[in-house]
């Protein structure tokens, strides 16, 4: 979930080009490929103002529902009023399908300082609790970061130890820890992510796969999906081009027909969540149209 300011702003400038893009391209699946059953969602931070800059959570949920989204993913911790969010969920029918641990980059589970790791563990436990409160079934976690201070082996050992401490709570709450690979120099090949997940021997830990993040690491996204199989709990994406970097959904190097084919083959039926720069209704409608196109949800 590595989300920079530049990535938040790219989409607003690209709306005008969207129509031309869609009229010139297609993302058809092979006729004999099983089709995944996908439900569109956005990250809550993408939802800009509708009629007012002070829109309530219910108004924001109503806005995305009117555009065709079924779900949303919230940060944890965040400034969102949890009671208000639950009421908005019940009133609008928008599903809060999970949360994103919002401190995993700051207080990493791989940090050399055990006090920092303890803060990271507390953040993960909070995310699990919040997911339960919202009715979600996953808490997205970037388990650690490899850098000048932390080797790959240290990241593995430290983060594994902390995640193990959180698993009893995950099991108690019925919320799964979803491990995401970003540009953190850790678990950069599917075999590594599989080994990391499998070591816990628990149904309450799996993978949160972002097909756009993985373009940097050369292994095709479809190969990741096929190898992860049932370990794949959730799926999100952006738009990434090796030559242009962050671009609009559908304008990157993602091989969408192959990604959809792989999702169908492994029996993935669930959430497809956009993670791009958001905005008000025009931007969100553009995002929804792009998602319909690449996910094969567009009604001809």
Image (cartoon, helix red, strand yellow):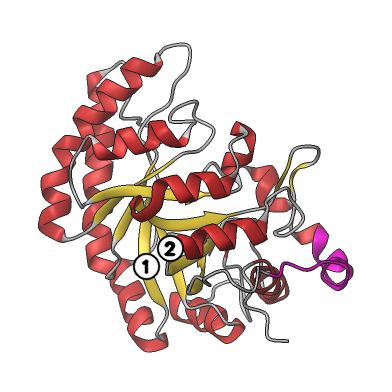
Residue at 80 percent of width and 37 percent of height: 243
Q: CA–CA distance between discs 1 and 2?
A: 6 Å
In this rendered view, identify the residue nearer to me: 169 or 179. Answer: 179
Image disc number at residue 97 = 1
Asked whether residue 17 is drawn in magenta, I would say: yes
Residue at 39 percent of width and 52 percent of height: 229
Residue 91 relative to residue 40: left or right = left
In this rendered view, identify the residue nearer to me: 243 or 25. Answer: 25
In the rendered image, residue 216, in percent from the top left (x then y), is placed at 63, 34
Q: Residues within 10 Å of mark 2 (few under 14, many from 20)?
A: many
In the rendered image, residue 25, in percent from the top left (x then y), is placed at 83, 66
Asked whether residue 237 is drawn in magenta, I would say: no
Residue 248 seen in this snapshot = yes
Residue beneath disc 2: 73
> Residue pushed farthest front?
32
Which quarter of the figure is the C terminus placed in?
bottom right
What main secondary structure does the magenta stretch of the protein show? helix
Contact? badges 1 and 2 (CB < 8 Å) = yes
Residue at 67 percent of width and 51 percent of height: 254
Q: Indicate whether 105 appears above or below 255.
A: above
Residue 227 relative to residue 136: left or right = right
For label 1, the SS is strand
Q: Which residues are magenta?
A: 14-28
In this rendered view, identify the residue nearer to me: 17 or 6. Answer: 17
Residue 111 seen in this snapshot = no
In the rendered image, residue 47, in percent from the top left (x then y), is placed at 57, 67
Residue at 43 percent of width and 26 percent of height: 145
Q: Indicate whether 11 appears above or below 18.
A: above
């Amino acid at each position: 979930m590595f989300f920079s300011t530049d990535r938040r702003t790219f989409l607003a400038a690209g709306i005008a080009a969207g129509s031309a893009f869609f009229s010139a391209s297609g993302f058809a699946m092979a006729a004999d490929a099983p089709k995944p059953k996908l439900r569109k969602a956005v990250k809550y931070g993408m939802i800009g103002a509708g009629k007012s800059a002070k829109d309530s959570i219910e108004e924001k949920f109503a806005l995305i529902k009117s555009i065709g989204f079924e779900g949303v993913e919230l940060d944890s911790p965040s400034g969102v009023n949890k009671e208000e969010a639950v009421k908005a969920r019940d009133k609008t029918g928008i599903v809060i399908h999970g949360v994103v641990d919002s401190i995993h980059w700051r207080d990493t589970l791989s940090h050399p300082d055990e006090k920092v790791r303890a803060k990271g563990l507390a953040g993960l436990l909070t995310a699990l609790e919040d997911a339960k409160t919202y009715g979600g079934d996953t808490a997205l976690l970037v388990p650690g970061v490899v850098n000048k201070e932390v080797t790959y082996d240290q990241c593995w050992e430290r983060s594994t130890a902390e995640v193990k401490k959180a698993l009893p709570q995950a099991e108690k709450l019925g919320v799964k820890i979803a491990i995401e690979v970003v540009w953190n120099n850790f678990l950069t090949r599917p075999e590594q992510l599989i080994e990391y997940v499998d070591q816990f021997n628990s149904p309450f830990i799996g993978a949160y796969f972002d097909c756009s993040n993985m373009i940097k690491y050369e292994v095709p996204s479809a190969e990741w999906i096929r190898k992860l199989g049932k370990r794949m709990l959730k799926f999100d994406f952006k738009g990434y081009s090796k030559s242009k970097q962050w671009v609009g959904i559908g304008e990157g190097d993602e091989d969408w027909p192959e990604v959809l084919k792989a999702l169908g083959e492994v029996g993935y039926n669930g959430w497809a969540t956009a993670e791009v720069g958001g905005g008000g209704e025009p931007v969100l409608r553009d995002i929804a149209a792009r998602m319909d196109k690449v996910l094969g949800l567009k009604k001809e």
